[in-house]
Image (spheres, rainbow, N blue to C red):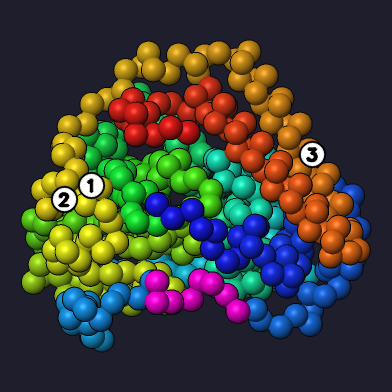
Amino acid sequence: MSAQIPPGRVETLSSDQELRLKQVWSHFLKHWGVPVDSAKVLAQENNQKPLSTTNTATSENKPKKGGSKLFGRFRKSAPAPKSEPLHKRTSSVTSQRSAESIESAYPHSLIHESLKNLKPEEVRENFWDMLRTDYPDNLLLRFLRARKWDTDKAMGMIAHTLHWRLKDAQPDDVIRGGEQAAYKNHEEGYVKNIELSKATIRGYDKKGRPIVLVRPKLHHASDQNEEEMKKYCLLIIEQARMFIREPVDCATILFDLTGFSLSNMDYSPVQYLITCFEAHYPECLGHLFIHKAPWVFPPIWNIIKNWLDPVVASKIIFTKNINDLSEHIPKEHIPEYLGGEDTYDFDSYQRPDEACDAKLSDGETREKILAERKEIIQRFIDVTVKWIECSSATESKQLLEEKIAISKELSKNYSQLDPYIRSRSVYDVNGTLKV
């Protein structure tokens, strides 16, 4: 697995990129009521030039010419069939285009207006709750990279995501309740998705990114309602985030279309996943492999590809066999049934015993770790204020290094806190997840 730190992360920032990060933090701190003299860094916003960005299609994301005939055939432009219902061709919640239309209502001058329905303390708490073991700066940098280092657009995207996390999806509640919540709340469709293991997090690709194996042949639209489907999607996304460790900051998805037929096709979860990755989990997708696509798939792909942002589309690779997959994934992490060496039984889900959640009732220890976390966060904020206000490049570099060191403390603190706030999943029980 590669441990190389990519460009555009807190450890590898250019001076211009660091300035944009300072601007984002300035807006957050001002909204939270933290005293900070940010006039100098914010004064440079209006006349900023676009920065080159690392999230455009690169040779790393583009499929290699060898073995790409299938990919090329599927990418030929074709309009949606006339018989296709309008709601399946165009969705109000599908792509980045719809997300950006919302974000456009949040310009720089009205950044506080974008958070008008959220209390500052509510936004502050949710921001720190968004973190798992990732660093605070790298979380914000995902939004900056996704918006090509445009501070205003990045702030709009973050505001949109905070509204979504707090007022709509509540993904933190989903991951903390975990699989047990589905059973306790008697959500039959949600439970069925879990027990069928439609999506399983298993193994890593050659860049150290956790792999989510999705088996659409197990899906039928009638098995669950829309709310249950969304919860299952969020559970898998948030569980995948639990596997990510710095400097890795994204996951890989392997859609195995073995046994797929038209009876398995359901556009709603596809639309929802596109929305999540483009609008709320930017820069969290490494590659998306579509494996063994059958002959019925091209018309479906012609519809789906029109919903995709070009950056996301550039990360999609069609594969046909073990040789294609093994270019990106070590054979020991490819399922045996696909020609690899992983003998894991993907149909063997067992509900974790409720006894595994004993630490959830230990409020005393939880409060002690949370108090330590609060102190670490305050130190991070204090150093961030100094970093924004400092006047020399040397001092800025030293303070940024101090921020990184505190981020590592915060990451370690979350590892200690996790069993006291999150119900154990099948991955905790089988030992593949070690937070």
Residue 340: mark in rendering: 2
Amino acid carrying label 2: it is Gly
- Of pointers 2 and 1, the one earlier in the residue sequence: 1
Seen from the viewer's position, the closer of residues 221 and 367 is 367
Mark 1 = which residue? 332
Q: Residues within 10 Å of mark 2 (few under 14, many from 20)?
A: some
What is the crowding at mark 1: few (fewer than 14 residues within 10 Å), some, or many (at least 20)?
A: some
Identify the secondary structure beneath mark 3. helix
Q: Is residue 65 magenta?
A: no
Residue 122 sits above or below residue 19 on the image: above
Instruction: Report the residue at 8% width, 72% height from top.
Output: 295
Which residues make up the magenta segment? 52-60
Q: Is the residue under label 3 in contact with that under label 1 (CB below 8 Å)?
A: no
Q: Residue at x 73, y 32 (%)?
A: 374
Query: Disc 1 or disc 3, which is closer to the eye?
Result: 1
For the residues labelled 2 and 3, the Cα–Cα distance comes to 47 Å
